Amino acid sequence: MCKNLSMALLIAAGAAVASVAYADPAIQAGEQIVAIGDSITQAGGYLRNIDTVFAKQYSDLKIPKVINTGISGQKAEDLVGRFERDVVARKPAIVTIDIGINDVWHRLNNAPDENVLQAYKANVGKMVEAAQAAGIRVVLCTPTVINEDVQSEGNKRLKLYCDAIKQLAVEKKCLLADLHGAFLQAIAKKPAELKGNSLTSDGVHMNAAGDWLMAEGILLALGIPAEKIEAAKQ
């Protein structure tokens, strides 16, 4: 991505999340975060950005680097099977759960199936319950995008999965990072002269701007002010 394109999208990304209300940071000194997810998490870009913000803006809290337990290609049903080992057993204070892209993307050749959607919600719910039973606070992330076209079939189907995450966040009193909403807003604000993907390398996996947008969404959910996030980018 050229420098001008990257800068323009970071500005758009910041505008997309600027309306989020801030609270006191929901993380205390020395608390560990574990991130579980698919290849987007495994790549680790947005997690490194979260580490950067804590290191630069909250060095006094001595927050350890986020533990990355993402595995490429996985769906919600895969995460359930390893949640005890990869999250609960590590005894973090906070877990971020970012899953759903493959639950939709890998099934686009099939007709939409309400049973698959309900199984997805049930599996994410099981992970939330396991975390909360162990005293782990949960940040639920709505899955990002499938192609940078808000009218794509993938994004139309993905909305139902995002709605399921939002419902779970309310029902189970989790923090919510509405990454899908932030991505759609950033795409809508993209200057017309900028062609091609601007937040992802291939419509799904993040580039630098997408990694920062994901990090921003999660940090805002944790009550980190936008100005501190922006300052850490410098």
Image (cartoon, helix red, strand yellow):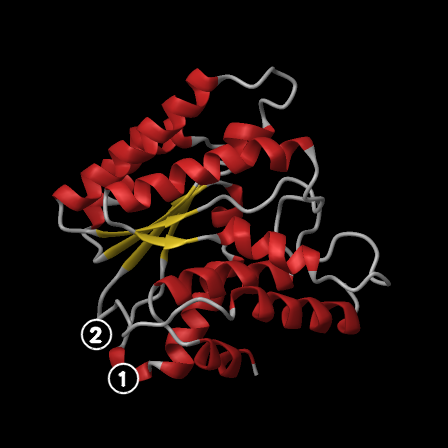
Residue located 29% across and 46% down the image: 170
Q: Specify the quadrant of the image occupied by residue 222.
A: bottom left
Above or below, comparing residue 205 to residue 29 in the picture: above
Look at mark 1 in the image and give the residue it sits on: 60
Q: Is residue 39 visible?
A: yes
Which label number is shown at residue 170?
none
Residue 193 or residue 204, whichever sits in front: 193
- Residue named by callout 2: 29
Q: Secondary structure at mark 1?
A: helix
The image shows residue 20 at horizontal and vertical percentages of 44, 66
Pick the quarter of the image with the C terminus: bottom right
Identify the mark nearer the N-term, 1 or 2: 2
Indicate whether 222 appears above or below 37: below
Q: Secondary structure at mark 2?
A: loop
Circle 1 Cα neighbour tier, 10 Å, few/some/many (<14 / 14–19 / ≥20): few
Residue type at mark 1: give it. Answer: Asp
Q: Are marks 1 and 2 in contact (CB under 8 Å)?
A: yes
* Residue in the image at 23% along x and 37% along y: 84
* Amino acid type, label 2: Ala
- Horizontal side of residue 214 vs 122, given as left or right: right
